[in-house]
Image: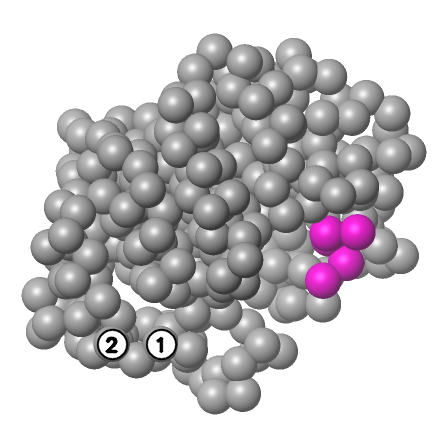
Amino acid sequence: MGFSGNSTQAQAIGRYGLWNTGLRDPEPSGAAERAETAVELEELGYGALWLGGSSGVEHAVPLIAATRSITVATGILSIWQHEPQDTAEQWAALEAAHPGRFLLGLGVSHAKLADQYKRPYAAMTGYLDALDTAEVPADRRVLAALGPRMLELSRDRAAGAHPYLVTPEHTAQARETLGEGPLLAPEFTVILEADPDRARAAARGLLAFYLELPNYTNSWLRLGFTEDDLADGGSDRLVDALFGWGDEQRVRERIDAFLDAGADHVAVQVLSTVEGRAGLPREEWRRLAATLDL
Protein backbone atom coordinates (compact mmCIF):
# COMPACT_ATOMS: atom_id res chain seq x y z
CA MET A 1 0.00 0.00 0.00
CA GLY A 2 2.96 2.33 -0.44
CA PHE A 3 2.34 5.85 -1.68
CA SER A 4 3.15 6.56 -5.31
CA GLY A 5 1.81 10.06 -5.70
CA ASN A 6 0.28 10.35 -9.15
CA SER A 7 -3.40 10.98 -9.75
CA THR A 8 -4.25 7.40 -10.70
CA GLN A 9 -2.58 5.94 -7.62
CA ALA A 10 -3.44 8.39 -4.84
CA GLN A 11 -5.81 5.74 -3.50
CA ALA A 12 -2.71 3.82 -2.39
CA ILE A 13 -3.21 5.44 1.00
CA GLY A 14 -6.92 4.69 0.94
CA ARG A 15 -9.80 6.98 1.75
CA TYR A 16 -9.27 7.01 5.51
CA GLY A 17 -6.23 7.42 7.72
CA LEU A 18 -5.54 8.46 11.30
CA TRP A 19 -3.81 11.63 12.53
CA ASN A 20 -2.31 11.39 15.99
CA THR A 21 0.49 12.87 18.10
CA GLY A 22 0.74 9.99 20.56
CA LEU A 23 2.06 7.61 17.90
CA ARG A 24 5.20 9.74 17.56
CA ASP A 25 5.90 10.06 21.28
CA PRO A 26 9.68 9.62 21.74
CA GLU A 27 9.35 8.06 25.21
CA PRO A 28 11.11 4.64 24.99
CA SER A 29 8.85 3.02 27.59
CA GLY A 30 5.89 3.30 25.21
CA ALA A 31 7.64 1.99 22.10
CA ALA A 32 6.19 -1.52 22.31
CA GLU A 33 2.63 -0.24 22.73
CA ARG A 34 3.02 2.18 19.82
CA ALA A 35 4.30 -0.60 17.57
CA GLU A 36 1.52 -2.94 18.68
CA THR A 37 -1.04 -0.20 18.04
CA ALA A 38 0.31 0.46 14.55
CA VAL A 39 -0.02 -3.23 13.71
CA GLU A 40 -3.63 -3.24 14.91
CA LEU A 41 -4.49 -0.08 12.96
CA GLU A 42 -3.07 -1.63 9.81
CA GLU A 43 -5.13 -4.77 10.41
CA LEU A 44 -8.24 -2.64 10.99
CA GLY A 45 -7.82 -1.28 7.47
CA TYR A 46 -6.61 2.31 7.88
CA GLY A 47 -4.58 3.41 4.88
CA ALA A 48 -2.17 5.85 6.52
CA LEU A 49 -0.89 7.03 9.88
CA TRP A 50 -0.19 10.77 10.08
CA LEU A 51 2.21 11.68 12.87
CA GLY A 52 1.33 15.05 14.37
CA GLY A 53 3.20 17.30 16.73
CA SER A 54 6.00 18.62 14.50
CA SER A 55 7.10 15.08 13.73
CA GLY A 56 10.30 14.12 11.97
CA VAL A 57 11.29 11.27 9.69
CA GLU A 58 12.78 9.43 12.67
CA HIS A 59 9.37 9.15 14.31
CA ALA A 60 8.04 7.14 11.36
CA VAL A 61 10.83 4.57 11.38
CA PRO A 62 9.66 2.29 14.23
CA LEU A 63 6.04 2.27 13.02
CA ILE A 64 7.04 1.37 9.49
CA ALA A 65 9.40 -1.33 10.77
CA ALA A 66 6.59 -2.85 12.88
CA THR A 67 4.04 -3.00 10.04
CA ARG A 68 3.87 -4.50 6.57
CA SER A 69 2.19 -2.09 4.19
CA ILE A 70 0.52 0.92 5.81
CA THR A 71 1.85 4.35 4.79
CA VAL A 72 3.28 6.51 7.57
CA ALA A 73 3.43 10.27 7.03
CA THR A 74 4.70 13.28 8.93
CA GLY A 75 1.88 15.65 9.64
CA ILE A 76 3.77 17.93 9.75
CA LEU A 77 7.58 18.18 9.74
CA SER A 78 8.48 21.80 10.51
CA ILE A 79 11.03 23.13 8.05
CA TRP A 80 12.48 25.32 10.81
CA GLN A 81 13.32 22.37 13.04
CA HIS A 82 14.97 20.08 10.48
CA GLU A 83 17.73 20.94 8.03
CA PRO A 84 16.78 19.85 4.51
CA GLN A 85 19.97 17.82 4.04
CA ASP A 86 19.27 15.88 7.24
CA THR A 87 15.68 15.29 6.15
CA ALA A 88 16.84 14.09 2.73
CA GLU A 89 19.38 11.70 4.24
CA GLN A 90 16.82 10.26 6.65
CA TRP A 91 14.30 9.94 3.81
CA ALA A 92 16.80 8.08 1.64
CA ALA A 93 17.69 5.65 4.42
CA LEU A 94 14.05 4.92 5.18
CA GLU A 95 13.22 4.56 1.50
CA ALA A 96 16.08 2.08 1.03
CA ALA A 97 14.88 -0.02 3.97
CA HIS A 98 11.13 0.20 3.27
CA PRO A 99 10.45 1.40 -0.28
CA GLY A 100 7.28 3.40 -0.81
CA ARG A 101 6.12 3.32 2.80
CA PHE A 102 6.83 6.89 3.89
CA LEU A 103 5.20 10.18 2.86
CA LEU A 104 7.02 13.37 3.82
CA GLY A 105 4.63 16.05 5.03
CA LEU A 106 6.22 19.50 5.30
CA GLY A 107 4.99 22.75 6.83
CA VAL A 108 6.15 26.26 7.68
CA SER A 109 4.73 26.12 11.23
CA HIS A 110 3.93 29.45 12.90
CA ALA A 111 5.70 32.56 14.10
CA LYS A 112 4.68 31.78 17.67
CA LEU A 113 6.40 28.39 17.49
CA ALA A 114 9.56 29.17 15.51
CA ASP A 115 11.90 32.01 16.43
CA GLN A 116 13.41 32.04 12.94
CA TYR A 117 10.01 32.31 11.24
CA LYS A 118 10.40 34.74 8.34
CA ARG A 119 9.10 34.86 4.77
CA PRO A 120 7.51 31.41 5.08
CA TYR A 121 6.69 30.99 1.40
CA ALA A 122 10.26 31.74 0.34
CA ALA A 123 11.56 29.48 3.09
CA MET A 124 9.43 26.61 1.85
CA THR A 125 10.50 27.04 -1.77
CA GLY A 126 14.13 27.06 -0.63
CA TYR A 127 13.57 23.89 1.37
CA LEU A 128 11.98 22.21 -1.64
CA ASP A 129 14.89 23.31 -3.80
CA ALA A 130 17.27 21.61 -1.37
CA LEU A 131 15.19 18.42 -1.38
CA ASP A 132 15.19 18.46 -5.18
CA THR A 133 18.98 18.72 -5.17
CA ALA A 134 19.14 15.78 -2.78
CA GLU A 135 16.82 13.81 -5.11
CA VAL A 136 13.85 13.49 -2.78
CA PRO A 137 11.05 13.08 -5.34
CA ALA A 138 8.36 15.74 -5.44
CA ASP A 139 5.69 13.06 -5.63
CA ARG A 140 6.71 11.69 -2.23
CA ARG A 141 6.00 14.84 -0.27
CA VAL A 142 2.93 16.92 0.61
CA LEU A 143 2.62 20.41 2.06
CA ALA A 144 0.56 21.75 4.93
CA ALA A 145 -1.36 24.29 2.86
CA LEU A 146 -4.19 26.60 3.90
CA GLY A 147 -3.94 29.67 1.67
CA PRO A 148 -3.93 29.91 -2.13
CA ARG A 149 -0.18 30.41 -2.61
CA MET A 150 0.81 27.38 -0.55
CA LEU A 151 -1.87 25.30 -2.25
CA GLU A 152 -0.43 26.29 -5.61
CA LEU A 153 3.02 25.30 -4.37
CA SER A 154 1.56 21.96 -3.26
CA ARG A 155 0.29 21.47 -6.77
CA ASP A 156 3.48 22.51 -8.52
CA ARG A 157 6.25 21.22 -6.25
CA ALA A 158 4.72 18.31 -4.32
CA ALA A 159 2.28 15.45 -4.58
CA GLY A 160 -0.45 17.60 -3.06
CA ALA A 161 -1.70 19.14 0.16
CA HIS A 162 -2.43 18.12 3.75
CA PRO A 163 -4.49 20.97 5.30
CA TYR A 164 -5.23 20.95 9.03
CA LEU A 165 -8.31 22.25 10.87
CA VAL A 166 -10.37 22.96 7.79
CA THR A 167 -13.92 22.46 6.56
CA PRO A 168 -15.42 20.76 3.50
CA GLU A 169 -15.82 24.26 2.02
CA HIS A 170 -12.06 24.74 2.27
CA THR A 171 -11.57 21.32 0.68
CA ALA A 172 -13.75 22.30 -2.27
CA GLN A 173 -11.73 25.50 -2.75
CA ALA A 174 -8.46 23.59 -2.38
CA ARG A 175 -9.51 21.06 -4.98
CA GLU A 176 -10.29 23.86 -7.39
CA THR A 177 -6.80 25.29 -6.87
CA LEU A 178 -5.04 21.93 -7.05
CA GLY A 179 -6.94 20.58 -10.04
CA GLU A 180 -7.86 16.95 -10.49
CA GLY A 181 -4.46 15.30 -10.17
CA PRO A 182 -2.75 16.19 -6.87
CA LEU A 183 -3.46 14.42 -3.61
CA LEU A 184 -5.73 16.30 -1.21
CA ALA A 185 -5.67 14.80 2.29
CA PRO A 186 -7.20 17.12 4.90
CA GLU A 187 -7.08 16.42 8.60
CA PHE A 188 -10.44 16.35 10.40
CA THR A 189 -11.01 15.94 14.13
CA VAL A 190 -13.94 13.87 15.35
CA ILE A 191 -15.42 13.21 18.78
CA LEU A 192 -17.55 10.11 19.29
CA GLU A 193 -19.79 11.90 21.78
CA ALA A 194 -23.47 12.68 21.26
CA ASP A 195 -23.81 15.16 24.14
CA PRO A 196 -23.29 18.66 22.65
CA ASP A 197 -21.86 20.20 25.80
CA ARG A 198 -19.31 17.45 26.36
CA ALA A 199 -18.34 17.31 22.71
CA ARG A 200 -17.93 21.06 22.32
CA ALA A 201 -15.98 21.31 25.58
CA ALA A 202 -13.51 18.72 24.28
CA ALA A 203 -13.29 20.52 20.95
CA ARG A 204 -12.62 23.89 22.57
CA GLY A 205 -9.89 22.30 24.67
CA LEU A 206 -8.02 21.49 21.46
CA LEU A 207 -9.07 24.62 19.57
CA ALA A 208 -7.75 27.09 22.16
CA PHE A 209 -4.15 26.69 21.05
CA TYR A 210 -4.95 27.26 17.37
CA LEU A 211 -7.05 30.36 18.06
CA GLU A 212 -3.73 32.05 18.92
CA LEU A 213 -2.19 31.28 15.50
CA PRO A 214 -2.91 33.77 12.68
CA ASN A 215 -2.35 31.21 9.91
CA TYR A 216 -5.44 29.40 11.14
CA THR A 217 -7.60 32.33 12.13
CA ASN A 218 -6.96 34.03 8.79
CA SER A 219 -7.98 30.83 7.03
CA TRP A 220 -11.26 30.71 8.94
CA LEU A 221 -11.95 34.36 8.21
CA ARG A 222 -11.43 33.65 4.50
CA LEU A 223 -14.05 30.91 4.82
CA GLY A 224 -16.63 33.42 6.07
CA PHE A 225 -16.32 33.20 9.82
CA THR A 226 -16.15 36.46 11.75
CA GLU A 227 -14.09 37.87 14.59
CA ASP A 228 -17.04 37.09 16.85
CA ASP A 229 -16.72 33.42 15.90
CA LEU A 230 -13.10 33.49 17.08
CA ALA A 231 -13.85 35.05 20.47
CA ASP A 232 -14.35 33.35 23.82
CA GLY A 233 -12.97 29.97 22.82
CA GLY A 234 -14.80 29.86 19.50
CA SER A 235 -18.50 30.08 18.69
CA ASP A 236 -20.66 26.98 18.40
CA ARG A 237 -20.79 27.70 14.67
CA LEU A 238 -17.00 27.56 14.37
CA VAL A 239 -16.66 24.51 16.62
CA ASP A 240 -19.35 22.59 14.79
CA ALA A 241 -17.76 23.37 11.44
CA LEU A 242 -14.23 22.36 12.42
CA PHE A 243 -15.08 19.27 14.48
CA GLY A 244 -17.32 16.30 13.78
CA TRP A 245 -19.11 15.09 16.88
CA GLY A 246 -22.07 12.84 17.56
CA ASP A 247 -22.92 9.19 17.15
CA GLU A 248 -21.10 6.95 14.71
CA GLN A 249 -23.41 7.61 11.78
CA ARG A 250 -23.22 11.39 12.15
CA VAL A 251 -19.44 11.28 12.46
CA ARG A 252 -19.14 9.20 9.31
CA GLU A 253 -21.33 11.65 7.41
CA ARG A 254 -19.12 14.52 8.53
CA ILE A 255 -15.96 12.68 7.44
CA ASP A 256 -17.41 11.71 4.09
CA ALA A 257 -18.42 15.32 3.43
CA PHE A 258 -14.71 15.98 2.80
CA LEU A 259 -14.59 13.21 0.22
CA ASP A 260 -17.71 14.60 -1.43
CA ALA A 261 -16.04 18.04 -1.52
CA GLY A 262 -13.01 16.72 -3.39
CA ALA A 263 -10.65 15.11 -0.89
CA ASP A 264 -8.92 11.87 -1.85
CA HIS A 265 -8.22 10.89 1.74
CA VAL A 266 -9.24 12.13 5.19
CA ALA A 267 -6.68 12.01 8.01
CA VAL A 268 -9.02 11.58 10.98
CA GLN A 269 -7.93 12.79 14.39
CA VAL A 270 -9.99 11.16 17.14
CA LEU A 271 -10.41 13.30 20.21
CA SER A 272 -11.43 11.20 23.18
CA THR A 273 -13.58 12.45 26.05
CA VAL A 274 -12.54 9.42 28.14
CA GLU A 275 -9.83 10.12 30.69
CA GLY A 276 -6.64 8.24 29.96
CA ARG A 277 -7.17 7.85 26.22
CA ALA A 278 -5.73 11.13 25.04
CA GLY A 279 -2.52 9.58 23.73
CA LEU A 280 -3.71 6.42 22.00
CA PRO A 281 -7.53 6.25 21.93
CA ARG A 282 -7.52 2.67 20.70
CA GLU A 283 -11.11 1.86 21.60
CA GLU A 284 -12.36 4.90 19.65
CA TRP A 285 -10.15 3.93 16.70
CA ARG A 286 -11.78 0.49 16.67
CA ARG A 287 -15.25 2.02 16.77
CA LEU A 288 -14.34 4.39 13.97
CA ALA A 289 -12.97 1.56 11.82
CA ALA A 290 -16.28 -0.29 12.14
CA THR A 291 -18.19 2.92 11.35
CA LEU A 292 -16.14 3.51 8.19
CA ASP A 293 -16.53 -0.11 7.04
CA LEU A 294 -12.78 -0.48 6.57
Q: Is residue 142 above or below residue 45?
A: below
Residue at the spot 13% in from the left edge and 46% down from the top edge? 99
Q: Name which residue lies at 8% across and 65% down.
A: 135
Please state the horizontal and vertical placement of residue 57, each as a whole percent of the image.
Answer: 32, 62
| Residue 222 visible | no
Task: Check disc 2 and give the amino acid type.
Answer: Asp
Q: Amino acid at mark 1?
A: His
Nearest the viewer among 36 and 138 is: 36
Question: How does the figure colour the protein chain or chains?
Answer: one colour
Q: CA distance from mark 1 to mark 2?
A: 7 Å
**In the rendered structure, does residue 207 fall within the stretch colored magenta?**
yes
Q: What mark, if any, has residue 82 been given in the picture?
A: 1
Q: Which mark is residue 86?
A: 2
Label 2: few (<14), some or many (≥20) within 10 Å? Answer: few
Label 2: state its secondary structure. helix
Say left or right for 108 vs 230: left
Question: Is 197 above or below relative to 24?
Answer: above
Q: Quadrant of the N terminus?
A: top left
Q: Residue at x 65, y 12 (%)?
A: 249
Return the x and y of residue 170 as percentages of the image width and height.
Answer: 52, 41
In this rendering, the answer to whether 8 lies above or below 134 is above
In the image, residue 204 lies at what x, y percent? 80, 48
Residue 197 visible? The answer is yes
Q: Which residue is found at the position 65% from the left and 67% from the top?
A: 213
Say which quarter of the image contains residue 168.
Answer: top right
Snapshot quadrant of residue 217: bottom right
> Disc 1, disc 2: CB below 8 Å?
yes
Question: In the rendered view of the protein, which quadrant contains the C terminus?
Answer: top left
Q: Nearer the viewer, residue 7 or 33?
A: 33
Identify the magenta region. 205-209
Residue 246 sits in quarter: top right
Report the side of 183 relative to 185 (left or right).
Answer: left
